[in-house]
Amino acid sequence: MAAELLKIEHLQKSYDSHVVLKNLSLFVDEGEVLVVVGPSGCGKSTLLRCINALEPVQGGRILLRGRDIHENEKNLPKLRQQIGMVFQSYELFPHKNIMDNIILAPIIVQKRKREEARQEAMELLARVGLENRANDFPRQLSGGQKQRVAIVRSLIMHPELLLFDEVTAALDPEMVREVLDVLLDLARQGRTMIIVTHEMQFARAVADRVVFLDKGKIVEESAPEAFFSRPQTERARRFLDTFSFETVRKSG
Amino acid sequence: MHFSDIFLKLWHAGLIQKGIWETVYMTVLSTVIAYLFGLPLGVILHVTDRNGLRPLPWLNRLLGFAVNFFRSIPFIVLMVSMLPVAKFIVGSSLGNSAMIVMLVIAAAPYIARMVESSLQEVDTGVIEAAQAMGCNNFQIVCKVLLAEAKPSLITGSVIAMVTVLGYSAMAATIGGTGLGQIAIVYGHQRSKPDVTWVCVLFLVVIVQIIQAVGSVVVRRSDKRVRQ
């Protein structure tokens, strides 16, 4: 049995009086790929933002290897280094070139040697096919390329857990593939990941386990095959139906 | 007498050169010193804001009040009211050292607000990205906030310097020197408008140079646009 890496217990999150996550409990094992799906506004992104404390929580605990992330602000930078996060809109630093975007945190946070960080950055860039763009600035890259750089930027920190927040939602259809291929590759390497996505085919292919979230609650939690072919709840069935279309044939 | 004759007379007397030097020296030195106070103050205002990296409402309100207090006093009134302060700091309420004190007192709060607004332009998304990578607040301020706001900060410094140049001419009314003094004392008070116009000409040239150099530096530092 794989060890438990992340454990969420009775998480409560609200903005003023609006409750976003209700008594949510969840775990992620080492090496597991968890895919979170659900309608927009169901709290998927908020869940990820709570996991690395970008959002304060109103109740419950989030434990990374048994250490509470929200317990002590002093430990936060240390814990966050173990959690990589990739955002929907990339969030690359626009005034830094690709190399400097990637090596900023290794150098100032992990105090690594510049040369060593550059070398690893080049290796990682080569893995995503961008080794010749190191000296370019973000504005010179396409959306798909920027997102691959953002993934490299989180990988270089050697995080134990990777969070992907709708990383293809802002991309043109043709660029979605190049980013998803990188994620599939990471899954094959046995990385622990939580992926929030609207790409159902991809979810089915990459997930070890699927969590369906609606109105801040886990409605369904199962293996991908079971979830996509035999959803247990009416709510999940309706959600999945929105992704399929009936063929329209015009007679005559 | 022709305009050029006036100009040559002033030039040969060395008056214009001295005026230009004094104006440039006062402007640059005052702006630099004002930034030593205004930049950290602007950073603190931004960081301690309700939505900042380290919200501290009481400190934010206190500093905000102090900044607004000094900014609401017209410069010419500020100068006369701060004479004792200048005397306390540089030992005299006359001369250019005293003027620099006044200019710094006037410019620092103004600069703080401009720095604050430049920092507000930095996308919160990249700040969150830095937090997610484990950067602490100090690292975010130094390596992300200030770095990403650089073009806007430089634009602000050009505006600040031109404003300080304008203030420095006003300092002539209470004994400051420079082109402003030549224009007011030699031109206005001795009824020689030509002398005033020579000063105007050089003030315009100085401002144009500051603006032109500033624009080039801003364009070079802005990586979001084609160079």
Image: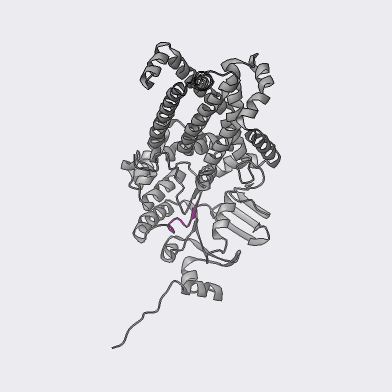
Q: How is the image coloured?
A: one colour
Residue A233 visible to an observer of this rendering? no
Q: Residue furthest top?
A: B13
Relative height, residue B192 to residue A198 (above, below): above
The structure residue drawn at horizontal position 56% and vertical position 24%, both measured from the top left corner, is B33
Q: Is residue A83 magenta?
A: no
Relative height, residue B23 to residue B121 (above, below): above
Q: Residue furthest bottom?
A: A252
Relative height, residue B68 to residue A215 (above, below): above
Residue A105: x and y in percent read 49, 38
Residue B114 visible to an observer of this rendering? yes
Q: Viewer-proximal residue, B155 or B182?
A: B182
Relative height, residue B82 to residue B138 (above, below): above
Q: How many marks?
A: 0
* Residue range corresponding to the magenta coloring: A163-170
Q: Viewer-proximal residue, B7 or A3?
A: B7
Residue B19: x and y in percent read 47, 17
Quarter in which the C terminus of chain B is drawn: top left
Would residue B55 be found to the left or right of residue B219 on screen? right
Residue B205: x and y in percent read 40, 27
Q: Quadrant of residue A212?
A: bottom right
Quarter in which the N terminus of chain B is drawn: top left
Q: Residue furthest front?
A: B1
Q: Residue furthest right?
A: B58
What secondary structure do most residues of the magenta stretch adopt? loop
Residue A191: x and y in percent read 46, 51
